[in-house]
């Protein structure tokens, strides 16, 4: 298959981009795909941390500064997913050449089925470099008005730069009346909801122990939502009912991961 480069983006910070990008990468890798998750929020460096990566002497910072080749900044994570982490040095951040980002990502294409870019929030240079390096993007929204307003801006910028909006992931919903409904979000954003992930304390527990929720709490609602998004990327269909046809098959193949030690 042709490599798909997918940006996981949102206008607002804290919507769950890193949690989703890392766990989605693991879910796809566990389904036999070659996957690399690239930290595109290079001033924060949380992708590697959330993946439980212990040591990463060379990071995307070195590559963006022209000091290292991209292959030197690739590390292995859970279920065989590969990770390109960012570094922790604040001094280096000032000297990064964001114009190189797209080129770096393109160099990863031949060895991957999926490249997932964990984007920075906002509309600054770092966020734009990560978003526009992708072919398509998935926007992560919390079902509240500010999140929606920001997502609309990102959608406009993505489309202006020929990055296709593939769908929305609604994260941290609490089934409260005040929340914007999926149907409304789909209308306003003119795209589909590919997964709905409830607020789930397992997600927080997992990130605080640096072990991805998809691996640590495979039966959690968070992991189920990730499976729903992974199924969409594998099959192109939005899975709402788990019991029928292809959807069931995909869920079963994802479910086999749940049973692995
Ligand atoms: N569905 C969820 N339920 C509960 N907490 C979540 C969920 N998704 C993410 N979180 C938590 O929210 C915080 C922000 O998530 P993160 O993935 O870092 O967001 P972003 O990358 O968009 O800033 C983290 O503490 C994470 O564990
Ligand atoms: Mg993040």
Image (cartoon, rainbow, N blue to C red):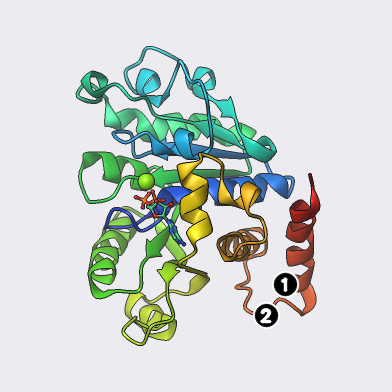
Give the image quadrant in which the ligand numbered 1 is located: bottom left
Q: Is residue 194 left or right of residue 110?
A: left
Determine whether the residue tagged by mark 1 lies in a helix, strand or loop. Answer: helix
The residue sitting at 35% across, 42% down in the picture is 130
Q: Is residue 54 above or below residue 21?
A: above
Q: Is ligand 1 within 8 Å of the beta carbon of the residue shown at mark 2?
A: no
Query: Which is nearer the eye, 125 or 160?
Result: 125
Q: Position of residue 124 (x, y in %)?
A: 20, 44
For mark 2, what is the residue? Answer: 241
The span from disc 2 to disc 1 (Cα, nearest Å) is: 7 Å
Q: Is residue 255 left or right of residue 89?
A: right
Any mark on residue 247, and which?
A: 1
Q: Position of residue 236 (x, y in %)?
A: 62, 66
The residue sitting at 27% across, 57% down in the picture is 11
* 2 and 1 marks in contact (CB < 8 Å): yes
Q: Is residue 181 above or below residue 112?
A: below
Looking at the image, can residue 86 be seen? Answer: yes
Determine whether the residue tagged by mark 2 lies in a helix, strand or loop. Answer: loop
Which image quarter: residue 98? top left
Query: Which is nearer the eye, 84 or 99?
Result: 84
Looking at the image, can residue 6 be seen? Answer: no
Q: Is ligand 1 within 8 Å of the beta carbon of the residue shown at mark 1?
A: no
Between label 2 and label 1, give the one nearer the viewer. 2
């Amino acid at each position: 298959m042709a490599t798909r480069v997918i940006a996981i983006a949102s206008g607002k910070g804290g919507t769950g981009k890193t949690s989703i990008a890392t766990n989605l990468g693991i879910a796809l890798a566990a389904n036999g795909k070659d996957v690399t998750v690239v930290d595109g929020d290079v001033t924060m460096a949380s992708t590697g941390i959330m993946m439980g990566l212990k040591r990463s002497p060379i990071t995307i910072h070195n590559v963006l500064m022209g000091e290292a080749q991209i292959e030197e900044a690739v590390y292995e994570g859970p279920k065989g997913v590969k990770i390109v982490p960012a570094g922790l040095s604040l001094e280096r951040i000032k000297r990064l050449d964001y114009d190189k980002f797209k080129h770096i990502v393109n160099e990863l294409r031949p060895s991957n089925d999926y490249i997932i870019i964990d984007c920075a929030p906002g509309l600054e240079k770092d966020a734009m470099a990560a978003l526009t390096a992708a072919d398509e993007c998935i926007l992560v929204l919390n079902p509240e008005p500010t999140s929606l307003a920001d997502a609309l801006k990102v959608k406009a910028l993505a489309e202006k730069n020929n990055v296709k909006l593939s769908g929305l992931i609604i994260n941290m919903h609490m089934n409260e009346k005040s929340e914007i409904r999926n149907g409304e979000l789909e209308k306003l954003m003119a795209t589909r909801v590919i997964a709905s992930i409830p607020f789930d304390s397992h997600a927080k527990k997992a990130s605080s122990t640096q072990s991805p929720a998809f691996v640590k709490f495979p039966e959690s609602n968070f992991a189920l939502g990730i499976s729903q998004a992974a199924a969409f990327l594998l099959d192109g269909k939005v899975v709402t009912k788990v019991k029928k046809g292809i959807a069931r098959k995909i869920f079963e193949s994802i479910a086999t991961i749940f049973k692995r030690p």
